[in-house]
Amino acid sequence: MKFPQVIIITLLIIVGCQSSRIPIDERWMHISGKRELSISGIATTTSENIYLVVHDNKKKGQLRAGLVNLLADSLYSGLSWPVKDLPIDLEALTNISGKNDQYIAMGSWGFCYWITLDLSANRLNLIKEFRIPGSGPPLNLESILLWPAGDSWYIAWAHRGSVKEPSILFWGSIDLFADVITIHKEDSIFVNVPWPILDKRHMSDMNLDRNDILWATATSDPGDDGPYESVIYKIGKFQKENDKMEFLIADSFPKQYVFQRNKVEALTIDGNKTVFATDDENLGAAINISIKGK
């Protein structure tokens, strides 16, 4: 990488991270008080006011996915999983760019599911399954990201970390449209955020903004009844250089958003909207939307 490019990219990250704490609308929209409906991943749909969400449930008979409709009297409606064999512990969800209502959902052990959403019928379909290389214990994956760059597709995933260990952000290229999906891991980096202090998970979800800057949510999770705390950071920037995808981690992590009572495990960025959803365990789930310029 040429030196002037390093300066420009670094300045972009610094400028994007200057605000230490953006004021947040504390009027969360309550979705449900049921632990079964707590939200571990969220993504946009082709309807502006409807979001697809996934749940980290593990038992038979429990929902794995649902829709949050901001205009409906009841914000939440459940979706049946499209096949008999249910995924275990879905922790993340990402859109497939350019493919309307198509997604990759991922469980904590790295099992991934390419699903499509039929909004007219409120129905999911399963296209294909694959697995993150090297996944499974001791890694606990809670974040996934998929994006195109040039003629290639890239995927990133993250181990959540704890007080005793940092998060690990992995990335690589993916043969998404091959008969057999293959991931070619390129690199990884440790991510160690300063806050929260206690019961820390460094990366509970992540998403890219339109400038390819990576946002991530860190949480404090002391147990099923809280109290919780979440902080949103700009972690760094993905940059393709000489046909290789690189990640430039930020020099520091100023707080972008702070939530004092909620465990934000789901994050998506939709234009000027940043959407947060919670896995508040026994306290259920809520959604919060920040709109820039308003």
Image (cartoon, grey):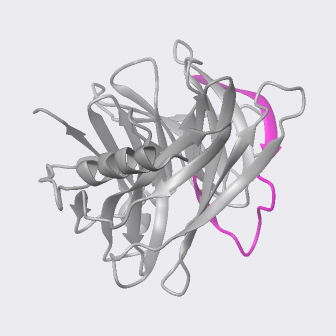
Residue 289 sits in quarter: top left
In the rendered structure, which segment of residues is drawn in magenta? 123-143
Asked where in the image residue 233 lies, by quadrant, the reply is: bottom left
Please provide percent x and percent y for residue 116: 64, 24
Where's the C terminus, which quadrant?
top left
Residue 229: name its quadrant.
bottom left
Residue 275 inside the magenta-drawn segment: no
Toward the viewer: 267 or 71? 267
Please state if 209 lies on the left or on the right of 111 as rendered: left
Q: Is residue 10 left or right of residue 114?
A: left
Q: Is residue 135 magenta?
A: yes
Instruction: Count the numbered circles shown.
Output: 0
Identify the residue at horizontal 18%, vertical 36% (top origin).
292
What's the residue at 64%, 61% (across, down)? 188
Residue 126 rendering spot, x and y as whole percentages? 74, 29
Q: Position of residue 218 (x, y in %)?
A: 40, 66
Is 225 above or below relative to 115? below
Relative to residue 43, is residue 187 depicted above or below?
Answer: below
